[in-house]
Amino acid sequence: MSVRSCLKAACLAAMVISVAACDEQKGGGDAAAQQAPATQVNFVEVQPQTIDLVAELPGRTVASRKADVRPQVDGIIKERNFTEGATVKAGQQLYQIDQSVYLANLDAAKAELARAQATLDQATKTRARYDKLIKTQAVSEQARDDAVAAEAQGKASVASARAQIDQARINLEYTTVTAPIPGKIGASTVTEGALVTANQEMALATITQLDPIYVDVTQAGGRLMRINQGIASGRIKSTAGDDGVDVRLVLDSTGDKYAHVGKLQFSDVTVNETTGTVRLRAVFDNPEQILLPGMFVRAFVGQGELEDAYLVPQRAVMRRPDGSAYVFTIKSDNTVEARALTIEQSKGDDWVVTKGLNPGDHIIVDGLQRVGPGAPVTPVAAKGDDAQPASR
């Protein structure tokens, strides 16, 4: 055999061995793939239920009433009759302004009334006398008319004098400055001996009513509109009682729950053009005066009930690039299926889902990164430390 023939035979043998080795390696890989174990995942089973829709909204406390105390007459402060920071009642005396000038004005008004009354009495007698004399033509028609006019002027003067007495008495009463509303009174801006003027710009003190107290919260206008539309269509059942919607508070500073339940009082009829939100106001009893104006709180406002909805753990829900939500569910053959969802809102650590699920669906909550649609899995019920393999 020639050298060339030997080389051809050697090359042919090498090619046959190489091809056989590749085929053997490929066959071994397919077998390995076919024997790969299913991925173990944890799941939760979901069932439809009636869910209370509660909106968690940021808010701030607002005093139910606030009044600046200002004098309504001029004068010197003679007394201050309250303790700064104390609780005062409506009508309680706060300051005493010097009354000397106003007592004198009242006396002068009374004297003017006496003079006007005397003039009226004289004019009335004159008119009555002329009424008799006119019948015998003992006086002229002009004289009688003058007497009637004088009597009318006398009556007007008496009325004016009485009005001056009323004005003088009112001014005298204004020298006693009282609390217009009940509540906590702040610091006094004046002391005894200070000169004050009627309707001055600077308030003498400020009273703030803390019980009850308001809580103003904001909610997205679009969300509120959808809730109202859902109630109108019957999709959402209203939970408002005869006395309104319940509102509960959590104090932002401490995280503690506020003991008293409030009531939703009203919602604005306009949407803020800058933020796109609507203001809601709730009223709360505040007998212990724990809530002070200006505090930040979190309000939980009941907005209805949603029937045949599902609670899905938020960690189980994924998002596509377009923002649509989906979950991985486990089919009866223990393979993975992607399921699109319609989400109503969040509730604690869960999403409230209205479409996309069926009763008894098994939703994967752990191991999502290791599986995809169609992948085989070994389902394990997610029950904390008590998780056990589940059969389908």
Image (cartoon, helix red, strand yellow):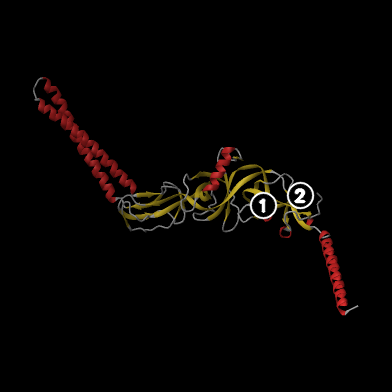
Element under disc 2: loop
Q: How crowded is mark 2: few (under 14 residues within 10 Å), some or many (20 or more)?
A: some
Quarter-wise, where is residue 240 in the image? top right
Rendered image quadrant of residue 157 = top left
Decide: marks 1, 2 in contact (CB < 8 A)?
A: no
Number of marks drawn: 2
Residue 162 coordinates in the image, percent (x, y): 26, 38
- Please identify the quarter of the rendering in which residue 26 is found: bottom right
**Depicted 242 relative to depicted 62: above or below:** above
Q: Residue 232 carries which label?
A: none
Between the residue at mark 1 and the residue at mark 2, the CA separation in whole angstroms equals 15 Å
Q: Which amino acid does label 2 sit on?
A: Lys
User: According to the image, label 2 marks what residue?
Assistant: 331
In the rendered structure, the answer to whether residue 65 lies left or right of residue 123 reads right
User: In the drawing, does residue 45 fall left or right of residue 266?
Assistant: right
Instruction: Residue 275: give x, y in percent of width and height.
Output: 49, 53
- Which residue is most to the top? 136
| Residue displayed at 33% across by 54% down | 200
Near-viewer residue (260 or 321) = 321
Residue 240 seen: no
Q: Which residue lies furthest to the right in this view?
A: 1
Q: Which residue is drawn at 26% across and 47% down?
A: 104
Residue annotated with mark 1: 326
Instruction: Look at label 1 and name its amino acid.
Output: Tyr
- Name the one closer to the observer, 321 or 381: 321
Residue 334: % across, % down: 79, 52
Q: Can residue 339 be seen in this view?
A: yes
Which residue sits furthest front? 2
Q: The residue tagged with tag 1: helix, strand or loop? A: strand
Q: Where is residue 35 in the image (x, y as percent from the top left)?
A: 84, 60
